[in-house]
Image (cartoon, coloured by chain):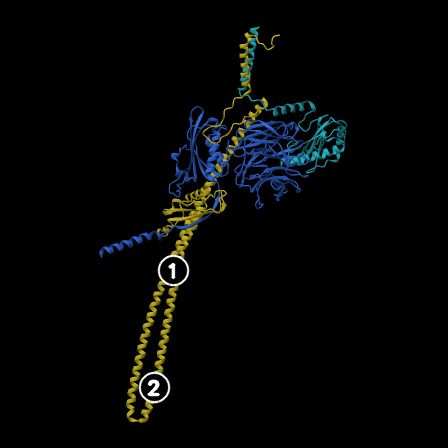
Amino acid sequence: MANRFHIPSAYRIPLAVSVALHLILIIFLAVHLPKSSYRANSIESMVKIINAVAVHSNQVQADIETLKAKETARQQAEAHLREMALAAEKRREQEQNRLEALQAAAIKKREEEALKLKTIQDQAKAAEKTRVIEEARVAALQAEQLHLQEKVAQATIAKKKAEQQKAEQQKAAQAKRAILAAQKLAQEKKVNDAKAANEAKANALLQKQKELQQKLLADQMAAEEKQLQQATQAAEQGILDRYKAQIIQAIEQQWIVPEGADQSLSCVLLIRLGPNGVVLSVSLVQSSGDVILDRSAQAAVFKASPLPVPKDPNQFAAFRELRLTVRPLQVTNASS
Amino acid sequence: MKMYTQWLKIGVVAAAALGLAACHTGYKPLPAGQTAEMGAEQADGASAYGMKTGDGYQGQGQKDANGRLINALVAPSNQTYYFEFDSDVVAQEDMKAISIQANYLATHPSARIRLEGNTDNRGSREYNIGLGWRRDQAVARIFEQQGVNAKQIVMVSYGKERPAAMGNNEAAWQLNRRVSLVYEAK
Amino acid sequence: MRHRQVFFSLMLALLLGIMQPAAQAALDLELTQGINAAIPIAMTTFAGPQVLTTGQQTLDQIIKQDLQNCGQFRVLANDQGQAAASIDYGYWRKRGANDVITGQIQAVGRDQYQVTFSLVSVFNSAGAAGAAENTLLSQSFRVNANQLRGLAHHISDLIYQTLTGVRGVFSTKIAYVLVQRAPDMTSKYTLEVADADGYNPQPLLVSAEPIMSPTWSPDGRKVAYVSFEGHRAAIYMQDIATARRALISAAPGINGAPAFSPDGRELALVLTKNGNPNLYLLDINSGSISAVTSGNYIDTEPAFSPDGRTLLFTSNRDGTPQIFQYSLASGKISRVTYRGDYNARARFLPNQHNIVLMHRENGLFGIALQDLTNGNMQILAQSGADESPSLAPNGKMVIYATEYGNRGVLSQVSTDGRIKLRLPAGEGSVQEPAWSPFLNY
């Protein structure tokens, strides 16, 4: 009995070839070639194309139409967005005009302040004038007093002489008269002494009066001088503070505080100004640790340029360099 | 004989090669779930329930003055039971219709119904799935009390996903607060 | 003697010279208040051929749209096609821009483009070292024509991150359900995935039965959703790239509200195993299920916290729907919302101490933001029909569903409440948007 699986020799080779071909085909059909990647080498992340699964041929048509409709809708929305952008631009320009008007008002105010200072100075001059007049009056009083003194002194001397001569003439004639005369002399001496004393008192009183008057005047002058000094100082310090406040206000309006900025952080900027308040440079002296916060503060200073500074070169000198500490403690909503 | 077998081999290889080519044209076979779903839906809609006027209205044609579907008092027939706002209490007037269907189900153990719970369009979607489910439970409880085996009742809640009427007013809301009873096997 | 005099006078002069600068010190000022406004930046048309990408937009038009719509920037446009070397700083300073974006595009090879862009500051800010640093960013790319739109979004991301310090979401995606209703109330439901700006919609699933609650896996490669195919609720997980899907849960009754854990290994979902809609946890690999809540309530809409330790969920266990929090370690449940008579669908922000949710007050449904540390609630939107809020992965923007013109549309609002945007609508009604995570592929 021949082996069921005995293959005639003529068929062996073709059969082997046929089996091999079939095996290769089966392997090909079973194994899927890997798909090519959509990943590009040069960018980090990108959109992966999603393989859409269409179910119905009708559906594809419907989907194409819906996509088209979506397109037109989107384009309309875009146009709408463009219009809104234009409107926002307009509003921003209006805002800029308002800010300029505010600045002009500020300048006007400054001029009024200068005028006030001038009137104070005029008042000081007037006070000076009255003081000089007072001094002259005091000198005149003094001269008069001296003149009176002389006269009184001369009078008493003359009186004394006359009395003495009378007493000497009467002495020889009568002893009583001499005693009386002597008594009279004594009495009169007393009276004269009293008179002299009174005169001296009167002089002393006059002197005191004069001194008091002088002191009063001196005090008045001193007080007025002090007031003048204080007024000048206050005016100068007020100007300084006012400019500082105006500078802060100008930068405040430009400072867009980053969202979620840590309130405990702060940075320090060194600002150099040129005449007329032009911002020449803004250097970061101390970073807050948050680069976005630092940059927001720097941008704010630049955008607020030119900063309001005094026109007077002496007063401006104090504003050449500003050391600004920035802390994101409060945020208000922009008015636009 | 040799000639025939030669052509046979060539034919097989050619067929295999064609099949291989088909794999590389880019045509993607559909996932099984989707085609089955579409096929099943068409089968359901076309044959089982006769007059088809949209999902949820399967088999019921007549409506009352408020637009509500009227339940036929014969079995087996699809039904719709309506509910008050925020309530899962079955209306008293539906009890008769329910007992007719319950009676049929109790006497036909191979019959099976599907209860579809629905709500009006107010509120979150998943929470409304829960509300629709409560309405299904209320109706199912009555059926079970009347002798229907729980295995004959399938419950699904559509929440607000399948409104019968559109609109943000009571006229539409009262038409959506419903449980639909659909026979899956009669 | 004379030499000594000269020496001493020199020393004196030197001393005085050193002391002199101290006489004029820098004036100290403090700035503590600023404004909350959009950063003004300038965008110039890119030099080179006006290549139109999908959607009939040029590269710079897409970048401009991205930056304008996110609410953080006010984009000033100019038609000068300038290369970075010739930026007119004076002109841009006058127009009030802080930074300028310029670029150029060049055709190279077959259907390929070389794209270069620069982000430059308009001010010469000196750093501590004193060197001027104008150019904040400058990069070059080589891409195929069909990758141009994606590249534009990538450039927007780079610019956004450089200027705000926060990662941009312009290259992310949104998933949503599109419903097309015929007059006889039959409907077609499509689960679509599109770019974050709404372009390039791709269907993942088309069905005649409802689709609900799409949610992204943490790696952004899969979307899980509820489908009512065959008149039964079931949860599927579908791979975006291959469109292949796996059936995850088809228990009798409700299979709903799937939510991935942050490590992508578990899915929180709603089942009615005990007759009531309660929360369960499903291990995706093993398929094993464990119960989270129980009781005769409606518990639904679970959402994991970013650290994976707690779950937010909606429950009517206190009467009306409110938000509760479940601790996975202790099993303790605590109530989160007390304001309003309806609170649902809460989601955590990445910072984990804020949540965004659907909230009703005075009969109006809206979207609210609640601070968990102090319970304060802020209404972000309240049209009366707002629902399904979903957060961008950088926590800055919320996308939600609302009604407009008798159909469902998608809207966006920033979490600081500053900007509101409605996405352009196509045909049909759109609902249940889900924002993808950052896509690192």
**Rendering colour (chain B):** cyan
Q: Name the residue under label 1.
A: A229
The amino acid on which the numbered mark 2 sits, given as a three-letter code, is: Glu
Is the residue marked by circle 1 packed among few (<14), some (14-19), or many (20+) residues within 10 Å?
A: some
Q: Mark 2 lies on which chain?
A: A
**For this view, does A139 lie left or right of residue B160?**
left
| The C terminus of chain B lies in quadrant | top right
**Judging from the image, what is the letter of the chain drawn in yellow?**
A
In which quadrant will I find the N terminus of chain B?
top right
Q: Colour of chain C?
A: blue
Q: Which chain carries label 1?
A: A
Q: Quadrant of residue B92?
A: top right
Image coordinates for residue A190, horizontal then vertical, percent: 35, 85
Q: Are marks 2 and 1 on the same chain?
A: yes
Task: Give the residue type that dot 1 points to.
Answer: Gln
Position of C338 compared to B101: left or right? left
* Residue A188's disc number: 2
